[in-house]
Amino acid sequence: MFKPKSATREKSAETVSMIGKGTLITGNIETTGDIRIDGILKGNLRCSAKILIGPDGIIEGDVEGKQADVMGTVIGHISMSGLLYLHGQAKVDGDIHAAQLQIDPTVSFNGQCKMGAQVVEISQPMALAVNE
């Protein structure tokens, strides 16, 4: 009569953690579910699911996760194992490490960027040989 819940259905039932506008959190956050930041986080964020930083969201700390959609401000390093999408009036002041990166022209980004599963630096002798 009743069918068992499928893994897909259980996963979709997970709640999204939300830090609302006007909220200030001081300290680190670690979560396995999706999270949306519309307030201020003064600390690091580690998330094994999707991160969404709204237009009013501010993170003063490092952000690590699987996938992120940033429209707000991050002052710190960002490290994503999947896609990092910076759009709207997003501001990032820190280094980025991401497997994939998409940046809109309206975004402000100050830092270094490394992409892909592995980043290989070219040694100076090899670079000189290529330029000769």
Image (tube, rainbow, N blue to C red):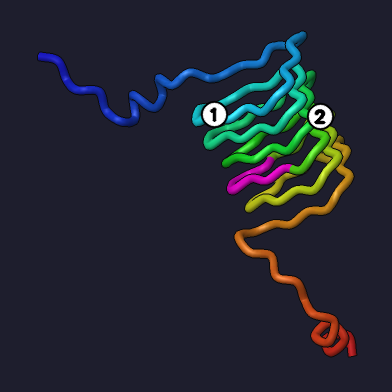
The crowd level at tag 2 (other Cα within 10 Å; few <14, some 14-19, many 20+) is many
Q: Which residue is mark 2?
A: 73
Where is residue 9 drawn, in percent x and y? 33, 24
Left/right of residue 30 with respect to residue 119 in the rendered view: left
The amino acid sitting under disc 1 is Thr
Q: Which residue is mark 1?
A: 31
- Kindly indicate whether the residue at mark 2 contacts the one at mark 1 (C-beta within 8 angstroms): no
Residue lying at 73% horizontally and 11% vertically, measured from the top left: 23
Where is residue 102 drawn, in percent x and y? 72, 45
Q: Is residue 23 above or below residue 108?
A: above
Left/right of residue 48 with respect to residue 116 in the rendered view: left
The answer to which of 1 and 7 lies nearer the viewer is: 7
Residue lying at 77% horizontally and 9% vertically, measured from the top left: 22
- Dot 2: what SS? strand
Left/right of residue 91 with respect to residue 86 in the rendered view: right
Measure the alpha-carbon separation of dots 1 and 2.
Answer: 20 Å
The amino acid sitting under disc 2 is Thr
Highlighted magenta segment, given as a residue range: 78-84
Q: Is residue 78 above or below residue 125?
A: above
